[in-house]
């Protein structure tokens, strides 16, 4: 193999690694690094954890994202977080408030069942009171249904 072939293979491998990093789905190690960076620089990170409709049950597709939170907390023993649930504006405000609180508690419960001390976490719900986007569109409502991790 000559030097040109070797450098071409290195470029191809680098491109594959960079492409994989850019498109890594939530729940991969890249996600925990992104969350850690956001917490360190902004004090908060937004996660889109999917729940069953109108329920506090975490969908299986979001379990890897919760596992990454556990890894982050294991790697940073001094880190303490507020887990904050948010909803869109579909439904009554009181119901959305209760739903957001239940979802935040479920994320905390799931994390603590994996060995993280409960005193490092606090659950809070904000219902529809802190939207990130316009609730007039499906896309906006989807952005508003979220869990935020806030450094305490």
Image (spheres, helix red, strand yellow):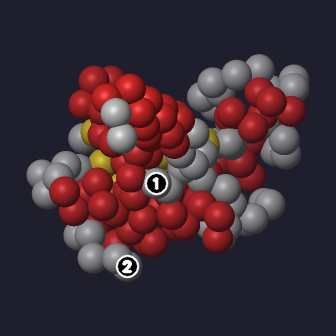
On screen, 41 above or below 118? above
Residue ID at (80%, 60%)? 53
Q: Is residue 1 something one can see in this rendering?
A: yes
Residue ID at (75%, 65%)? 52
Considering depth in this image, is 24 or 34 the residue closer to the camera? 24
> Which numbered disc, 1 or 2, marks the residue that appears first in the sequence?
1
Left or right, 12 with respect to 135, comes to left
On screen, 90 above or below 8? below
- Assess disc 1: are there few (<14), some (14-19) or many (≥20) residues with their C-alpha within 10 Å of its C-alpha: some
The C terminus lies in which quarter of the figure?
top left
The N terminus lies in which quarter of the figure?
top left
Considering depth in this image, is 14 or 78 the residue closer to the camera? 14
Extreme-front residue of the structure: 2
Q: Quadrant of residue 50?
A: bottom right
* Disc on res. 113: 2
Q: Is residue 21 something one can see in this rendering?
A: no
Q: Quadrant of residue 69?
A: bottom left
Residue ID at (41%, 45%)? 30
Q: Quadrant of residue 40?
A: top left
Location of residue 94 in the rendering, given as x and y in whole percent from the top left corner: 72, 47
Location of residue 124 in the rendering, given as x and y in whole percent from the top left corner: 46, 49
Location of residue 37 in the rendering, given as x and y in whole percent from the top left corner: 30, 32
Q: Mark 1 = which residue? A: 28
**Numbered disc 1: secondary structure:** loop
Location of residue 84 in the rendering, given as x and y in whole percent from the top left corner: 48, 45
Extreme-left residue of the structure: 78
Q: Nearer the viewer, mark 1 or mark 2?
A: 1
């Amino acid at each position: 193999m000559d030097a040109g072939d070797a450098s071409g293979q290195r470029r191809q491998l680098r491109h594959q690694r960079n492409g994989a990093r850019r498109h890594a789905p939530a729940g991969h190690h890249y996600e925990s690094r992104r969350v850690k960076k956001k917490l360190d620089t902004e004090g908060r990170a937004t996660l889109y954890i999917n729940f069953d409709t109108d329920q506090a049950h975490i969908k299986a597709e979001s379990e890897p994202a919760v596992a990454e939170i556990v890894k982050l907390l294991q790697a940073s023993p001094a880190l303490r977080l507020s887990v904050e649930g948010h909803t869109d504006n579909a439904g009554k405000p009181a119901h959305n408030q209760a739903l957001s609180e239940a979802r935040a508690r479920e994320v905390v419960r799931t994390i603590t069942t994996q060995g993280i001390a409960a005193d490092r976490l606090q659950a809070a719900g904000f219902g529809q009171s802190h939207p990130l986007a316009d609730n007039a569109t499906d896309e906006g409502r989807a952005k508003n249904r979220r869990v935020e991790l806030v450094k305490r």
